């Protein structure tokens, strides 16, 4: 009988990335490479079932691609905006889902349920941290911040080689650091949060246009506020690297990153935080899916020793 570890090249994990703008799926092999990917726009709907219907359709397309390639599915990983608890998600930028049982619903999809395939869930920015630590810009780093600057803003923090979870697994919500005291009201109820001032939705509200059409002054302001938040984290947690992805950050490119670095240089002045840097994710738009795949591969227990070693240190103690 062939051991599953000997057949690992035929195994893939299903990665699902759910955000306020798009829903993406992919098949991730044990090396962290995507063998298939697809995406759809996130419906701006009030019906939670309409939204989940898009997830279900994309999952079926991915599973068909795996079958056509002769690949076996061994686990599912989901990255989604938060907050979340016990498999229930309430993304601030997806109003249709409040305490939506995402893990149970994905696990109940026929192919997943019939195969007894494990389903894992974590915050989308935390799985980005996994991706960049496994195969990206932060590989080999023991202390770093990963951020998503997109429709919303989230973060994942690795300290002393461990991805931080927090009491309810929501550690790293950098989008809710106050960067403009008394500023715009945030979906969380506070005022002046980074998400209320610099996210894609905030940019639309402020400018009256889509983020890609925002003027350079707004792009620089977003970068400045992102840098302000990063500097605060660097000062608080003694780390010197932030890797940033998401459609807004990557779309604004050098304009955002240069403004952010200037703000970090001005605000991170302690002996241990001075010189902190901000860089775009190395994995680009693939990072969220690679991270969700990492989450799934961990659950499968099937990684080869070398690949398992690469990921092992990033997992918080349960």
Image (cartoon, helix red, strand yellow):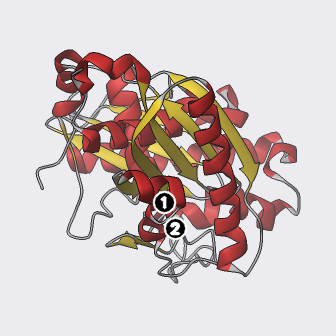
- Label disc, if present, on residue 193 of the rendered structure: 2
Q: Nearer the viewer, residue 25 or 243?
A: 25
Q: Which residue is mark 1?
A: 175
Q: Quadrant of residue 88?
A: bottom left
Residue sitting at x 58%, y 48%: 149
Count of number-bearing discs: 2
Q: Are marks 1 and 2 in contact (CB under 8 Å)?
A: yes
- Residue 120 placed where, x, y %? 35, 54
Q: Nearer the viewer, residue 222 or 115?
A: 115
Residue sitting at x 42%, y 47%: 76
**Label 1's element?**
helix
Q: Quadrant of residue 171?
A: bottom left
Residue sitting at x 72%, y 59%: 42
- Residue 305 placed where, x, y %? 16, 19
Using a 10 Å C-alpha cutoff, classify the residue at mark 1 as few (fewer than 14 neighbours), some (14 to 19) or many (20 or more).
many
- Residue 109 placed where, x, y %? 53, 62
Screen quadrant of the N terminus = top left
Work out whether 224 lies above or below 166: above
**Label 2's element?**
loop
Using a 10 Å C-alpha cutoff, classify the residue at mark 2 as few (fewer than 14 neighbours), some (14 to 19) or many (20 or more).
many
Residue sitting at x 47%, y 52%: 79
Q: Nearer the viewer, residue 111 or 250?
A: 111
Mark 1–mark 2 distance (CA, rounded to whole Å): 6 Å
Q: Quadrant of residue 249?
A: top right
């Amino acid at each position: 009988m062939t051991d599953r570890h000997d057949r690992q090249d035929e195994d893939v994990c299903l990665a699902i990335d759910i955000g306020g703008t798009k829903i993406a799926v992919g098949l991730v092999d044990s090396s962290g490479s995507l063998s298939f990917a697809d995406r759809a726009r996130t419906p701006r709907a009030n019906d939670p079932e309409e939204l989940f219907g898009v997830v279900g359709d994309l999952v079926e397309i991915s599973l068909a691609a795996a079958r056509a390639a002769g690949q076996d599915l061994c686990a599912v990983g989901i990255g989604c905006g938060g907050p979340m608890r016990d498999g229930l998600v309430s993304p601030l930028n997806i109003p249709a889902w409040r305490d939506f049982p995402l893990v149970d619903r994905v696990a109940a999809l026929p192919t997943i349920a019939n195969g007894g395939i494990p389903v894992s869930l974590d915050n989308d920015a935390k799985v980005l941290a996994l991706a960049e630590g496994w195969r990206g810009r932060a590989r080999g780093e023991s202390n770093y911040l990963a951020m998503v600057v997109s429709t919303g803003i989230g973060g994942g923090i690795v300290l002393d080689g461990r991805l931080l979870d927090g009491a309810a697994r929501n550690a790293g919500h950098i989008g809710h650091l106050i960067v403009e005291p008394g500023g715009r009201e945030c979906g969380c109820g506070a005022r002046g949060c980074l998400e209320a001032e610099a996210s894609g939705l905030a940019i639309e509200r402020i400018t009256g246009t889509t983020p890609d059409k925002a003027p350079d002054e707004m792009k620089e302001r977003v970068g400045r506020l992102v840098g302000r938040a990063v500097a605060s984290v660097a000062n608080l947690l003694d780390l010197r690297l932030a890797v940033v992805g998401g459609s807004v950050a990557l779309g604004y490119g050098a304009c955002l990153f240069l403004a952010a670095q200037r703000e970090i240089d001005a605000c991170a002045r302690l002996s241990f935080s001075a010189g902190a840097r901000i860089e775009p994710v190395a994995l680009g738009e693939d990072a969220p899916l690679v991270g969700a795949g990492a989450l799934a591969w961990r659950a499968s227990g099937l990684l080869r020793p070398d690949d398992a070693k690469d990921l092992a240190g990033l997992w918080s103690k349960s």
